[in-house]
């Protein structure tokens, strides 16, 4: 955020006030090296009153080997203590959720806040789609920015890649495989999909937590909002009738601008991909039903 001069005011709020003060100090010390004149400080929920965006990334992180849904009960309690005071501050902006399990925590935020669906969404599979584009770019020798491919569904174990929609430039990945059978193999593509799904586990095993990818994903989403970009990102938002789903929040390509989720781009999924999405949505519904609110 600081390096990319994203906003003019950045308030850090944490139950651990010392940590928020320390983080704000540390960030401020980088200002002289940036092209930013951001005001950065630690604060209270009352500071959210005129904010454009509240990013919630507070709560328990995964431990090595832990699955995201195992955080659900703890983080629902954390969210009860955050979303209500933010709303009481008079906040009328957009909630962006990163805390895991992100799809369910986003639905929890929508429920507690009562905000319109367009103004509550999560990072969803934005990070997974970036991981996919990086790995496909590396495999095919193409800049990730020219790889157009998404991860959809839960940000977690039931996520999937709709390969029928994956493109290198404007050529389908499936056609690239078919045209170059000696160079590129379907089994490598399947390995890449599994690698994306398991990336967080690997990074957490190696260094305890993931920081940079998610940080850049959040900045990208916030920029799409603040600069009214109409960018398409696979955020977690209410599917709202798309793909025969009503109340589920899951990663799906959506157009993001200053109003939040402007609309969803409903892809023409194959029957197999629709089945995978259904399975992911069923798992998310079960997680949501398992919590007491
Ligand atoms: N959606 C995604 O792609 C990603 C999600 N995450 C998730 O983000 C969350 C945070 O992860 P980390 O930053 O690594 O954890 P962390 O432990 O470094 O930071 C969490 C912070 O939340 C604060 N906190 C806890 N309870 C609170 C409360 N009731 N009110 C206010 N603040 C509270 C803690 O004091 C701590 O400073 C986890 O749920 C993690 O799984 C992390 C990386 C990627
Ligand atoms: C921690 C997490 O959810 C991720 O890096 O994907």
Image (cartoon, helix red, strand yellow):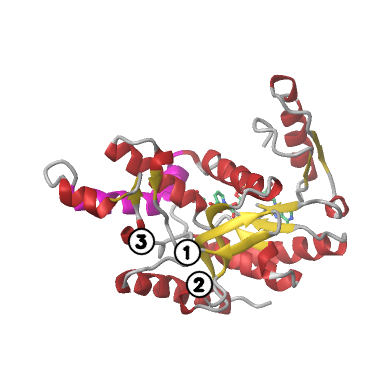
Q: Which residues are magenta?
A: 185-206
Q: Is residue 193 left or right of residue 108?
A: left
Residue that lies at the very extreme toward the top in this rendered image: 33
Q: Is residue 73 magenta?
A: no
Local SS, label 3? loop
Given contact means CB atoms under 8 Å apart, are the residues at marks 2 and 1 in contact?
yes
The residues bearing labels 1 and 3 have C-alpha atoms spaced at a distance of 13 Å
- Numbered tag placed on residue 154 in the rendering: 1
Asked whether disc 2 touches disc 3, contact meaning CB atoms under 8 Å apart, the reply is no
Residue 99 seen in render: no
Residue 188 is one of the magenta-drawn residues: yes
Q: Between residue 110 and residue 169, name the one nearer to us.
A: 169
Residue at the image position 30 percent from the left and 35 percent from the top: 141
Residue that mark 2 sits on = 284
Q: Position of residue 64 (x, y in %)?
A: 46, 50
Q: Nearer the viewer, mark 1 or mark 3?
A: 3
Q: Secondary structure at mark 1?
A: loop
Question: Which residue is at the front of the view, 269 or 84?
Answer: 269
Question: Depth check: 142 or 60 in front?
Answer: 142
Frontmost of labels 2 and 3 is: 3
Task: Return the disc, 1 or 3, that comes first in the chain's sequence.
Answer: 1
Question: Is residue 99 shown above or below 11?
Answer: below
Q: What percent of the width, then of the height, locates residue 282?
A: 45, 77
In this rendering, is residue 92 above or below 207?
below
Q: Secondary structure at mark 2?
A: helix
Label located before the other in sequence (2 or 3): 3
268 or 213: which is nearer to us? 268
Classify residue 248 as left or right of residue 24.
Answer: left
Q: Real-space Cα distance between discs 2 and 3?
A: 18 Å
* Circle 3 residue: 162
């Amino acid at each position: 955020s600081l390096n990319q001069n994203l906003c003019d005011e950045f308030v850090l709020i944490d139950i651990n006030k010392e940590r928020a003060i320390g983080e704000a100090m540390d960030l401020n010390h980088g200002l002289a090296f940036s092209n930013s004149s951001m005001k950065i400080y630690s604060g209270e929920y009352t500071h959210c009153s005129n904010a454009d965006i509240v990013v919630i990334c507070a709560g328990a992180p995964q431990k090595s080997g832990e699955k995201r849904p195992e955080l659900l009960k703890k983080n629902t309690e954390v969210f009860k203590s955050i979303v209500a005071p933010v709303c009481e501050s008079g906040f009328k902006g957009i909630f962006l959720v990163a805390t895991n399990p992100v799809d369910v925590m986003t639905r929890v935020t929508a429920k507690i806040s009562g905000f319109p669906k367009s103004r509550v969404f999560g990072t969803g599979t934005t990070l997974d789609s970036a991981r996919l584009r990086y790995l496909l770019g590396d495999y095919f020798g193409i800049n990730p920015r020219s790889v157009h491919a998404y991860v959809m569904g839960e940000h977690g174990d039931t996520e999937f890649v709709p390969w029928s929609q994956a493109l290198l430039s404007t050529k389908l990945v499936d056609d690239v495989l078919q045209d170059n059978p000696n160079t590129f193999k379907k089994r490598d593509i399947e390995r890449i999909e599994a690698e994306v799904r398991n990336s967080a586990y690997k990074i957490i095993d190696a260094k305890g937590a993931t920081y940079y990818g998610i940080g850049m994903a959040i900045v990208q989403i916030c920029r799409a909002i603040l600069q009214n970009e109409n960018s398409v990102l696979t955020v977690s938002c209410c599917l709202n009738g798309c793909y025969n789903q009503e109340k589920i929040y899951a990663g799906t390509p959506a157009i993001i601008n200053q109003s939040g989720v402007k609309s969803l781009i409903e892809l023409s999924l194959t029957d197999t991909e629709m089945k995978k999405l259904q399975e992911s949505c069923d798992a998310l519904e079960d997680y949501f039903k398992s919590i007491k609110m």
